[in-house]
Amino acid sequence: MRDGDDENGSEERLFVGTAEAEHVEMYLKAIWHIKERGGDVKITSIADMLHVKQPSVVQMLKKLNAKRLVNYNKAGVRLTDEGEKIGASMMRNSRLLEVLMHNALKVEINEEMVCGIEHHMDKQFTDALCTMLDHPRLCPHDNAIPMGECCLSRDDAGEDGKAD
């Protein structure tokens, strides 16, 4: 048995997170959340939400603009369709994890842990978690959870999950 192998001989794999990708996702999530609350998406509101300095926000908005995830100009900041999709997905992940902690695990919601996990959830995991939690519509903070395809297919099939 080699170092790092488990008893079945398969190698345990470790992954180093991509900080840049997580930063991008956090900015898109913050913009999405500010918009959801009906606030003006401005450099100051983003900086306040993320607890960063305004020049850092400007630098990231330029990157997001170049990646076509936001439209950033003198008129303000708007998510593109792709930026909206990523922001909603991050908020969905976050809120489903909060429901998992609060309702299923009966533990105090740890926002730092939620933030660490949400970036590593793929669609299959998120949909499985949502299904396991019975497709919750609100998080414990009474904020709407963006619906996924698993919720839409359930609604199409009827409340009991069976086609009408």
Image: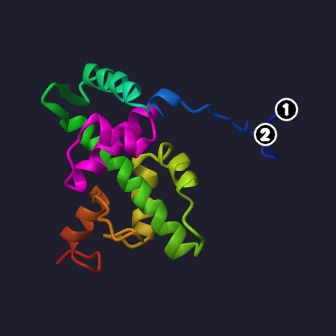
Picture coordinates of residue 39 (x, y %)? 22, 50
Per the image, label 1 sits on a secondary structure element best described as loop
In this figure, which residue is indicated by the disc labeled 1?
3
Q: What residue type is labelled 2?
A: Gly
Q: Is residue 163 above or below residue 27?
A: below
What separation in Å lies between label 2 and label 1 (alpha carbons)?
10 Å
In this figure, which residue is indicated by the disc labeled 2?
9
Near-viewer residue (82 or 36): 36
Q: Which of marks 2 and 1 is nearer the N terminus?
A: 1
Residue under the point 47% across and 64% down:
98
Picture coordinates of residue 104 (x, y %)? 53, 74
Q: Which of marks 2 and 1 is in front?
A: 1
Q: Residue furthest left?
A: 75
Per the image, is 18 magenta?
Answer: no
Direction from residue 63 to residue 15 in the image, left or right: right
Q: Is the magenta stretch mostly helix, strand or loop?
A: helix
Q: In which quarter of the image is the C terminus?
A: bottom left
Q: Which amino acid does label 1 sit on?
A: Asp
Per the image, label 2 sits on a secondary structure element best described as loop
Magenta-tinted stretch: 23-52
